[in-house]
Image (spheres, helix red, strand yellow):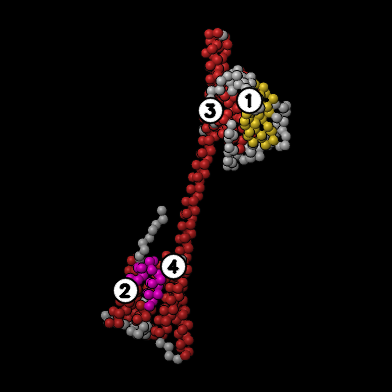
Amino acid sequence: MPHRSWPLHPGAGFGCGLVAIGLLLWLPSAAEGDHDLGPVPAPGSAAWWMVVAVLLTQAVAVAWTRCAPAVVLPGSTAVALVLVPVVPGPAFTVTVVAVLVAVFLAAVAHPLRRLGVPLLVAGVLLATGWFLTAGAHDASEVGVAVVAAALQALLVIGLPLLLGSVIAARRDAHEARRLELVALRGEQDALLQAAISRQRTALSRELHDIAAHHMSGIAMMAAAVTRQIDSDPETAKRSVSQIREQSRAVLADLRRLVGLLREEADVARPVETLDALSALVEARRAAGTEITLLAPAGHVEVGPLSQLVAYRMVQESLANAAAHAPGASCVVEVGVPRGGRLTVSVRNGVPTGPDPGPGGGFGLVGMAERAQLVGADLDHGPTSEGGWEVRLGLPLGETVSTMCAPATLPEAPHDPRAHRR
């Protein structure tokens, strides 16, 4: 938090008065060594006490410079004019000390646009006082006295004004740098929170994919075991073995996810790609689902991130079909690239078992977020045969940066079955 200074300057006023009175006490000694100084009031005389009163008045006024510069600057020079008819000469020069300090404090505390008129008035009054104390008699002396008074006033006003402006500019620059650092810290905190939020969203998607894919299969096989254990013990044993394999797969995926949170990430484990769809389909077939895989031969020019998005979409769609369309056959199709895009779709037929009811709806949301991450198009909805289809259009090549902010998610269709996924 920046330091807040006092509106008054009692120390500056006290120091100003002390220096001015010290100079006044020194004047008699200076006048003895230099007779050109002119008459100097003797200490203790009425004129001397009048000068002291003016100096003290100026010192008090200097303490209020920050609060009222428009009054202090012309006032501290105007009060010194009362000394011109009483003690002209060096005694008037001593009053300049207060003017110097007042101009400096005003320049430090206030912008120059606010001090223009007060400084002009103070300069005119100061030049007037010096002109009157010069005692010019003929025209030539008057001209010299006017120029000398103007130059002296310009020097007395200009020097502290320049010094105060430099100090104020450095202070403002320091404050601007401090505020810039505060803004940068705030921006860094905001970016950090946004990064943490994105990581949390990504981790929640991974957990959802793991749970939806593996746990739904385990649940289906466990339900089948309860019916087979008495009627077909051999088949029940195979189902238990498959449950064990699925459980190991769950543990492997969870270990991989935990590894992402550590510095020593498991980089040896390959990322899921389109080539891994066959293994995914085989795992689902082993769980009892009828699945057909249609994929073109050859290599497809799709970036690794896009392939991971496609893999997750197929994995989630098959899990949704198993959960909400029990007994339905599925078709996983990887199309031929056309128009710079590759289409990957998952269709399921009419379910033969009862629908367990609507799910949380996060599966479709996660698929849409992943698609937007790579600039893909995601469509889903019921088919004319009474089934369900999810279609993903991937751009060829890795054209979208993962650092881009995700776009607004598309609105879900009004079909009630969309909320089951």
The residue type indicated by label 4 comes to: Ala
Q: Which residue is mark 3?
A: 359
Q: Within 10 angstroms of label 4, few (less than 14), some, or many (20 or more) residues?
A: many
Q: CA distance from mark 4 to mark 2?
A: 22 Å
Q: Amino acid at mark 3?
A: Gly
- Kind of residue indicated by mark 1: Gly
Name the element at disc 1. loop
* Of marks 4 and 3, the one in the foreground: 3
* Residue 408 in view here: yes
Where residue 149 sits in the image (x, y, percent)? 44, 81
Q: Position of residue 331 (x, y in %)?
A: 66, 24
Displayed quadrant of residue 272 = top right
The residue identified by callout 4 is 107
- Please tell me whether mark 3 or mark 1 is closer to you in this view: 1
Mark 1 and mark 3 in contact (Cβ < 8 Å)? Answer: no
Going from the N terminus, do you reach mark 4 or mark 3 first? Answer: 4
User: What residue sits right under mark 2 in the picture?
Assistant: 56
Query: What separation in Å lies between label 2 and label 1 (alpha carbons)?
Result: 100 Å
**Residue furthest to the bottom:** 138
In the picture shown, does residue 67 fall above or below 346? below
Q: Please, what is the three-letter code of the amino acid marked with disc 2?
A: Leu
The alpha-carbon separation of the residues under discs 2 and 3 comes to 86 Å
Determine whether 77 is above or below 415 in the image: below
- Mark 1 or mark 4, earlier in chain: 4
